[in-house]
Amino acid sequence: MLTRVQVAFHSIFRSPPAFIVRAPGRVNLIGEHTDYNEGFVLPMAIDRAVWIALRPRTDRRVLVHSLDLNLSAAFDLDSLTRGKNRWEEYIKGVAHELQLAHYHLTGWEGILTGDVPRGAGLSSSAALEVATARAFASVSGFEWDALRIARIGQRAENNWLEVQTGIMDQSVSAGAKAGHAFFLDCRSLEYQHIPLPKDIAVVVMDTSTRRGLVDSAYNARRSQCERAAKFFGVKALRDVGVEKIEEEKNKTKNVKGAWLDDVALKRARHVVTENARVLKAVEAMRLNDAVTLGRLFNESHVSLRDDFEVTNDALNWIVEAAQARSECLGARMTGAGFGGCAVALVPKDSAEAFAKAVGAEYRARSGKETAIFVSEAGEGASVV
Ligand code: GLA
């Protein structure tokens, strides 16, 4: 990727770039649909990223050429307006939010490329947002504060792209440390880098089914969670304990005589139990206990399938194919769901055979293609 972006920059601009920046995609190990409930998440950056080679301009224009789409974008920082090309809107959205947050931006021109599969649940959009912010930070000379930048990326997504995502993807893309998972408290935004278990491979399994985040299902889950939080009389589901959910199942009304529908109760049960699983997963990782971690993966998948209802057949099949292998410590869907990727843990020395066998089983059952790869835990956004 580095060479690709360097060579392309040179051939277009006839000089070396002033900066090369990159920001990774992510795979979430555990803690799904917990971020917008102010809970806990444990993603890691993958070793695939969005790259930008750039140089500053003396005016306030931004000119970007996407190698992968073979499309160019040009806009003025003083007159940002919405357009139709989604990839370009991420860049504008970040510029817009940075300026709203009083960052003084310099114009730039550059080349964009990347190897994060798009729309696969590996946060190619967050990687683009964070890489854009890194590009602006380089030419404009402002300090890199990972979590502040993550908020900017999230706001770009929420306000400019109008997708109500949480803070997880941008945070890990901006702040991850190589070899570590990124344990984030989505309320306080405090985080810790947790080393991955030794000799264990993280295997990403793409179902090749896709769903844009723009459709209503994600936003619907959010409002069901909000409804449940309101019912329990708390700010967010983060504040509800597992016992409370069990109690509630046996009651039909809360103290004020209000009802909580079954759907919202199931959604809440997922969030509350998932938060507890993240904390146990962190504990297991600290003890280098990959067996417990794998078990938590399996439990998370069941909860996402039955209570949160965000899996599709393809995700269930690939997870079942993975879990059926004796070397598999655990597997679950990852990301928003409804398509995209699953993630599994296996001993490093059996990862290759595992990928082959799961790929064959999934293809046979679904009739679909799949890409299965092992990812190291990558480094967060950086200037190369
Ligand atoms: C998407 C969102 C995240 C998070 C996950 C589900 O990736 O961007 O904020 O909500 O879905 O865990």
Image: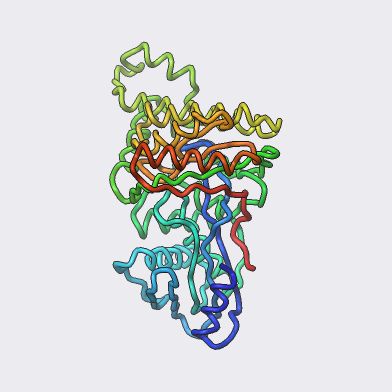
Q: Quadrant of the C terminus?
A: bottom right
Q: Position of residue 116 (x, y in %)?
A: 48, 57
Residue 379 sits in quarter: bottom right
* 12 to the left or right of 2: left
Ligand number 1: quarter of image: top left
**75 over 124 or under it: above or below:** below
Instruction: Name the residue: 49% across, 29% down.
Output: 324
Q: Which residue reaches farthest top?
A: 250
Instruction: Name the residue: 50% across, 54% down.
Output: 151
Q: Position of residue 3 (x, y in %)?
A: 59, 73
Instruction: Name the residue: 66% across, 44% down.
Output: 193
Of 227 and 166, which appears nearest the observer?
Answer: 166
Of 68 and 105, which appears nearest the observer?
Answer: 68
**Residue 37 in sight in this render:** no
**Residue 160 in sight in this render:** yes
Q: Which residue reaches farthest bottom?
A: 14
* 189 to the left or right of 287: left
Residue 79 sits in quarter: bottom left
Coloring basis for residues: rainbow
Instruction: Name the residue: 56% across, 66% down.
Output: 134
Q: Position of residue 295 (x, y in %)?
A: 56, 26
* 348 to the left or right of 163: right
**131 over 173 or under it: above or below:** below
Q: How many numbered circles are shown?
A: 0
Q: Position of residue 61 (x, y in %)?
A: 44, 80
Of 167 and 169, which appears nearest the observer?
Answer: 169
**202 over 108 or under it: above or below:** above
Q: Quadrant of the N terminus?
A: bottom right
Of 214 and 118, which appears nearest the observer?
Answer: 118
